[in-house]
Amino acid sequence: IKTGITWIRAAGMATLFEHNDAAAFFNLSADASFQDYTKTGQPVFINSVSKTLQEIKAPKNVIRLNGWSGFLQRPVWEIAGNPDAGHYAVLEALQKKSFVTPDEPGFISARIISMIINEAFFAKEENISTEDEIDIAMKLGTNYPNGPFEWSRQIGAKNIYDLLVSLYKNDSRYKPSSLLLQKVTNP
């Protein structure tokens, strides 16, 4: 937590907007894209990797970010929407740089990492190698900080699968591995 910033954790959406003096609101929960944000004009940041602002009919003060595990610790956040001076002031206070991406599922990095993970599941499914060996090969061969299966465990297989399903609706390249589906349905 950055110095000079007071964070208040709301017990839920019912109490979130009771904090009228808040400079901004963050909803990093898994169901952030299914909430009503019309009760405030303050900047709102939501964790919504698979759902777009257009899909959820979000008001203009809402922007999306990738709240998956590991992504918020990065110095640059991918955001989607129409950030205004209020959003940028919050990002500056958090000492975060931002990169505005089109309002599409997956942003950029989550889409690419999901594909890497999906390909690793295809490789395992075809008995090319084990999870540990694939992780080691990707870390040593590409200098990735994590292997694809490590990323899958960190981010959550369901998050990866949900994004791939969303992307697959418009592009067959994103077809989820049946082994990934099995991982999601039988953890």
Image: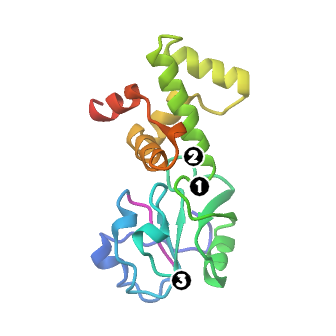
The type of colouring in the image is rainbow
Choose the circle earlier in sequence order: 2 or 3. Answer: 3
Q: Which one is nearer the viewer's eye here, 48 or 88?
A: 48
Can you say whether 27 is above or below 157 in the image?
below
Number of numbered tags placed on the structure image: 3
Whether label 3 touches label 1, CB < 8 Å: no
* Disc 2 versus disc 3: nearer the observer: 2
- Marked residue nearer the N-terminal end (3 or 1): 3
Residue 118 placement (x, y as % from top left) = 50, 32
Type of amino acid at the residue the image marks with label 2: Arg
Near-viewer residue (58 or 131): 58
Question: Residue 87: image x %, image y %?
Answer: 61, 77
Q: CA distance from mark 2 to mark 3?
A: 30 Å
Classed neighbour count for the residue bearing mark 1: other residues with Cα under 10 Å, few (<14), some (14–19), many (≥20)? many
Whether tag 1 and tag 2 are in contact, CB under 8 A, the answer is: yes
Q: Is residue 131 visible?
A: no
Q: Which residue is mark 3?
A: 23
Q: Is residue 46 magenta?
A: no
**Mark 1: amino acid:** Phe
Q: Quadrant of residue 34?
A: bottom left
Rendered location of residue 60, percent (x, y):
52, 82
Q: CA distance from mark 3 to mark 1?
A: 25 Å
* Cα–Cα span, label 1 and label 2: 6 Å
Quadrant position of the C terminus in the picture: top left
Q: Quadrant of the N terminus?
A: bottom right
- For label 3, the SS is loop
At 58% from the left edge and 50% from the top edge, which residue is drawn? Answer: 71
Q: Which mark is residue 111?
A: 2
Q: Is residue 23 visible?
A: yes
Question: Label 3 is placed on what type of residue?
Answer: Ala
In the rendered image, which residue does mark 1 sit on? 107
Point out the stretch of residues depicted in magenta.
23-29
